[in-house]
Image (cartoon, rainbow, N blue to C red):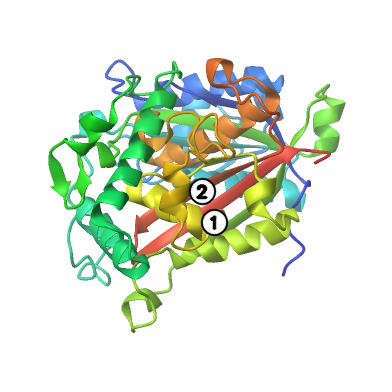
């Protein structure tokens, strides 16, 4: 494995807007809102930022194809600004650009921004977006709920889980996220729901009901990163460093043979293995303190627990029902409400996940603060469909961990 970047980069400051239907703000204003929190947290001036990355996935109407909107919105001083797009993993991609710039020595201080202003574009998650001339015909099943419903069916068939047990476990995932989101003032959805409500909701794509699906939101999230040495020189004492940052992208093999059973995400397993090696984590089930994962659908979160090597293969649904991932459980997942309730402004989601882990590590998460001091926070950001996707994993922790 390459040498990696463990502890070479520190998070100097972060910010995040309230997610939701932000009819009162345009994309520029959302970026400024997230930035103002981040720059205040970092305690620096805009002129000290050497480079920036902008992550946005679907919002071409408002953002366009370049880094110019970010540069203009923040009045950056003619520094290099790069726009990145990698489906729902775009936020983590922007973070990767900024982190790698600092780790390489190309920048002392760099910024990552993720933003999406979707509600007034009419985008509601359907239909599947074209992937250009070459790949346009690969989207066989045509909708996100349809594709992820097949993940649920394949998982159940592979592991012999009864239809009722899997439905109960998926419902528990959604009930948990709603309970956590109700404690988060920045969450899009802040209302608890009961198991009965989730189980009796209208069916979207069997077995996924309405509450098994996340919606889309408006919002932005921002990170400012530097080296641990510079962070200390700027007066920071509680230093949060990047322990690992890994991306794995499907190369098409899932659809080109009989080797994949459709019940898991190969990219997540590969990225997780690399990330743990980079971070020096040998037993993620006991060493990871909390997680934010890409819960676009409840079944995605459940399967991801196994792909991240937290639950044994075929046993993730049992851990879910046992409360292992509840806010007061052994390893909380989506303690901020997740995509399901914090919301899913696609380009911002990866950074929002890191933001929550950052707050939790610093003890700043308010009513949802984890009582046991966290050591490592993992975020898992997934873009695409089960059969072709991009997986990005970031692990952050205290500098001395």
Residue 8 image label: none
Label 2 SS? strand
Residue at (51, 38) in percent of width and height = 333
Would you call the spot at circle 1 few (<14 residues within 10 Å), some (14-19), or many (20 or more)?
Answer: many
Q: Which residue is mark 2?
A: 380
Task: Identify the residue shown where x is 35% and y is 42%.
Answer: 64
Image x and y of residue 276, in percent? 67, 57
| Residue located farthest toward the left when viewing the structure as drawn | 202
Picture quadrant of residue 117: top left
Given residues 218 and 369, the one toward you in this image is 369
Q: Is residue 372 left or right of residue 156?
A: right
In the figure, is residue 18 to the left or right of 212? right
Image coordinates of residue 14 in percent, x first then y, are: 60, 27
The answer to whether 374 is drawn above or below residue 246 in the figure is: above
Q: Position of residue 294 (x, y in %)?
A: 43, 46
The N terminus lies in which quarter of the figure?
A: bottom right
Residue 375 lies left or right of residue 191; in this view the side is right
Viewer-closest of 54 and 274: 274
On screen, residue 361 above or below 184: below
Mark 1: secondary structure? loop
Mark 2 vs 1: CB contact within 8 A: yes
The answer to whether residue 18 is seen in the rendering is: yes
Find disc 1 in the rendering and name its residue. 308
Return the x and y of residue 397 as percentages of the image width and height: 71, 39
**Mark 2 → mark 1, Cα distance in angstroms:** 9 Å
């Amino acid at each position: 494995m390459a040498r990696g970047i463990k502890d070479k980069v520190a998070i100097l400051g972060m910010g995040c807007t309230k997610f939701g239907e932000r009819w009162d703000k345009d994309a520029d204003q959302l970026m400024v809102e997230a930035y103002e929190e981040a720059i205040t947290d970092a305690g620096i001036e805009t002129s000290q930022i050497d480079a920036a990355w902008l992550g946005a996935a679907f919002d071409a109407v408002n953002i366009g194809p370049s880094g110019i909107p970010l540069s203009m919105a923040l009045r950056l001083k003619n520094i290099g600004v790069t726009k990145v797009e990698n489906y729902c993993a775009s936020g983590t991609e922007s973070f990767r650009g900024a982190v790698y710039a600092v780790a390489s020595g190309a920048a002392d201080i760099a910024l990552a921004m993720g933003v999406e202003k979707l509600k007034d574009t009419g985008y509601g998650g359907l239909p599947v977006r074209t992937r250009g001339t070459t790949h346009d015909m690969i989207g066989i099943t045509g909708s996100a709920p349809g594709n992820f419903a097949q993940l649920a069916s394949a998982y159940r068939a592979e592991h012999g889980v009864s239809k009722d047990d899997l439905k109960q476990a998926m419902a528990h995932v959604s009930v948990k996220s709603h309970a956590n989101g109700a404690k988060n003032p920045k969450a899009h959805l802040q209302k608890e729901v009961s198991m009965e409500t989730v189980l009796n909701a209208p069916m979207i794509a069997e077995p996924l009901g309405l509450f098994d699906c996340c919606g889309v939101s408006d919002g932005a999230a921002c990170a400012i990163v530097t080296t641990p040495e510079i962070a200390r020189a700027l007066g920071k004492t509680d230093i949060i460093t990047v322990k690992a940052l890994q991306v794995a992208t499907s190369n098409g093999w899932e659809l080109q043979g009989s080797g994949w059973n459709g019940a898991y995400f190969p990219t997540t397993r590969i990225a997780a293995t690399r990330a743990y090696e980079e971070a020096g984590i040998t037993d993620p089930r006991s060493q990871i303190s909390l997680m934010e994962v890409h819960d676009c659908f409840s079944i995605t979160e459940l399967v991801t627990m196994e792909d991240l090597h937290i639950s044994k293969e075929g046993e993730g649904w049992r851990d879910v029902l046992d409360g292992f991932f509840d806010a007061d459980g052994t390893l909380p997942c989506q303690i901020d409400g997740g995509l399901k309730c914090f919301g899913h402004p696609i380009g911002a989601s990866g950074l929002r996940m890191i933001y929550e882990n950052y707050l939790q590590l610093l003890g700043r998460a308010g009513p949802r603060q984890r009582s046991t001091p966290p050591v490592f926070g993992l975020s898992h950001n997934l873009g695409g469909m089960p059969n072709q996707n991009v997986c990005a994993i970031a692990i952050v922790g205290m500098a001395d961990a």
